[in-house]
Amino acid sequence: MNIAKPIFDIKPEHGEGPIWDPIEKKFYCVDLLRGSYYKVDWETGVSEEFSVGQELGVMALCENGKIVVGVRDGFGFFDEPLKKLELIENSPEIEVKERRMNDGAIDPKGRFFAGTMEYDGANPTGKLYCLHQDMSWNCLEENIYITNGMGWSPDKKTYYMIDTFRNLMYAYDYDIETGNISNRRLHIQWEKDEYPDGMCVDADGGFWVAMWLGSKVSHFDANGIWVKDIEVPVLHTTSCCFAGDDLKTLVITTSNLNLSKEEKEINPLAGRCFAFETEIAGQIEPRFKA
């Protein structure tokens, strides 16, 4: 049976952005609208929560030990010991109050890709940005409803990104030297009532896509062909990552956002993290090179 089981005791309101740290054996995930993240010891399950101070769409680990973040006001760095957020100078969209950062990932060269969305996702005003090591940034893509799950092929030649309200995943040619993307094409198309959210890419180039309103994570091969679904006993699955020493534990984040009192009673585990053991290993995620 392809059914994920609950893991850890944390229960974010809107869990997102899972990260596995193979060095410290820690698992991270964000509580997006509350502007905080959890850091969980993989062996003991003991967790800490850190408040960033504004909506936290995505976070990633840095080589220097800090945390790079995509927040309401753009790009910044969170110093965990000092519990302090510092935005970069001229942070993108710092004056745009109707949008926030939503999802992102570190590219194979250590750059930080992250994208924006309107709070309700009603209009295609989202943009995809790239933060470089010298703290400069550029806009790579526009006209996005909800910038969501992204990743790279194992050969580092292709970049993938989901636009949730277009119900699709794009593929782009990726230039590893510059970080530029080009030649956008459709890679996976879902039905109009199916909403792909966050995702991760495995070592074979396959995709594991969390489905909002779908109670599942869908596995596709590198060509975008559906393989199987992993059932998750909550309504909203939001994202996933590979964790564990062998990178074969798929950890799935979920949400209890927008659930009525009755729906929360039906979904008592909403917000919890779930785990599913796979036969395919994931990829070790790069760190930001500050």
Image (tube, rainbow, N blue to C red):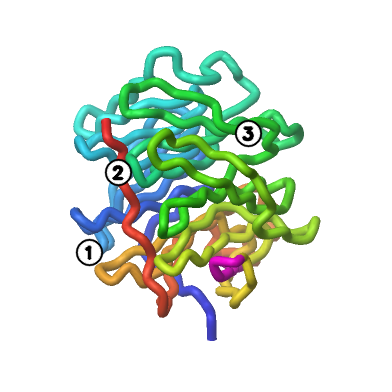
The CA span between labels 2 and 1 is: 24 Å
In-image side of 278 versus 191 (left or right): left
x, y percent for residue 229: 60, 74
Q: Is residue 15 visible?
A: no
Nearer the observer, 7 or 229: 229
Give the overall secondary structure of the magenta segment: strand
At label 3, the amino acid type is: Met
Dot 3 alpha-carbon crowd within 10 angstroms: few under 14, some 14 to 19, many 20 or more: many
Magenta region: 216-223
Looking at the picture, which amino acid does disc 1 mark?
Answer: Thr
Looking at the image, is mark 3 or mark 1 nearer the viewer? 3
Instruction: Estimate the x, y position of residue 147 in percent, counting from the top left.
Output: 60, 40
Where is mark 2, residue-wise?
287
Which is nearer the N-term, disc 3 or disc 1?
1
- Residue linked to disc 3: 117
Q: Tell me, for residue 44, which label it has, or none.
A: 1
